[in-house]
Image: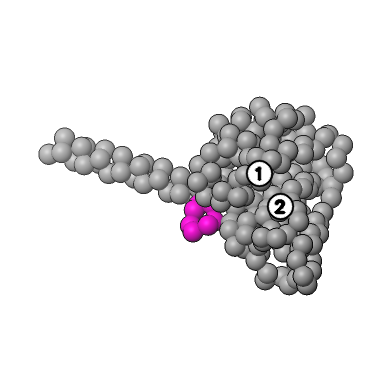
Amino acid sequence: MKGTRTIILITMLCVSLLTASVAFAQNNTISEGGRFKAIANEKQLETLNRLYNTDISFGELVEAAYPEAMEYIPAQALQNMYKTKVIWPNQDTPSNTESTTQQADVTPQQVILVGHESNISPGQTIDFDSGSRVWLPYPTYKIPYISVLSTLEREGVGIVASAFEIDTNTNAVSASSSYRNPASDKYRTVGYHNGDFPPNHVPQSYSTVTSTSWKQAP
């Protein structure tokens, strides 16, 4: 009888562990419709650090670091991403919040303004995010594609955490995550922003980088 109970307990434990693993995977990657979001694991962080400061396109970077996202990226967006070189920040890149303004090559002409930013909140847990949002012609105006790759860098060490999010037919995307129990050191958030404008717009896409200043974690 004891042997039977032991087997049942072991089976229940295995099921619990399997369920927990599946839940973690589901929390780590979210996909629905045209939206995809993922939090980098150790292997993906190694890839990001290995490719840092290399001559690479944004499409190649996403393919290497977040290959599971490729099937959710529209063909035209992917084509533009492979044509766009990654702009890597250097150690002294100042904090910035950038906006890109693109004007339609149609009549009547219409201005589309997309704002971009990165944020960091250091503490026992570091919260970080990077996002892009359409402001003009109006805040709910949707463009075909927006992607944001957000990374948390530790000074002198490299990328220690990352999140990637894409969405289609949308007005905003924010890639965010948390880094628990950080070592006492300086950290910053860097955001890599990429997106596509509606047909007949010149240029067809945008790409820019935002970053915070270095912040001391306790």
Residue at point 77%, 46% (across, down): 209
Residue furthest left in the image: 1
Name the residue that disc number 2 marks: 205
Residue at point 69%, 40% (across, down): 83
Q: Quadrant of the N terminus?
A: top left
Q: Position of residue 200 (x, y in %)?
A: 70, 60
Q: Could you tell whether 16 is left or right of 131 in the image?
A: left
| Above/below status of 116 relative to 134 | above
Q: Could you tell me the amino acid type at mark 2?
A: Ser
| Above/below status of 107 relative to 42 | below
Where does the magenta region start and end?
Answer: 30-36
Q: Earlier in the sequence, mark 1 or mark 2?
A: 1
Q: Position of residue 139 (x, y in %)?
A: 71, 70
Res. 5 image quadrant: top left
Does the magenta portion include 38?
no
Name the residue that disc number 1 marks: 81
Q: Quadrant of the C terminus?
A: top right
Structural crowding at the residue carrying mark 1, measured as other residues with C-alpha within 10 Å and reported as few (<14), some (14–19) or many (≥20): many
- Magenta highlight: main SS: strand
Q: CA distance from mark 1 to mark 2?
A: 9 Å
Q: Could you tell me the amino acid type at mark 1?
A: Met
Does the magenta portion include 33?
yes
SS at badge 2: strand
Q: Marks 2 and 1: in contact by CB < 8 Å?
A: yes
Q: Position of residue 144 (x, y in %)?
A: 62, 59
Residue at point 78%, 72% (across, down): 108
Is 45 in front, or is 216?
Answer: 45
Q: Is residue 81 in view from this perspective?
A: yes
Q: Could you tell whether 172 is left or right of 67 in the image?
A: right
Residue at point 60%, 45% (across, down): 78
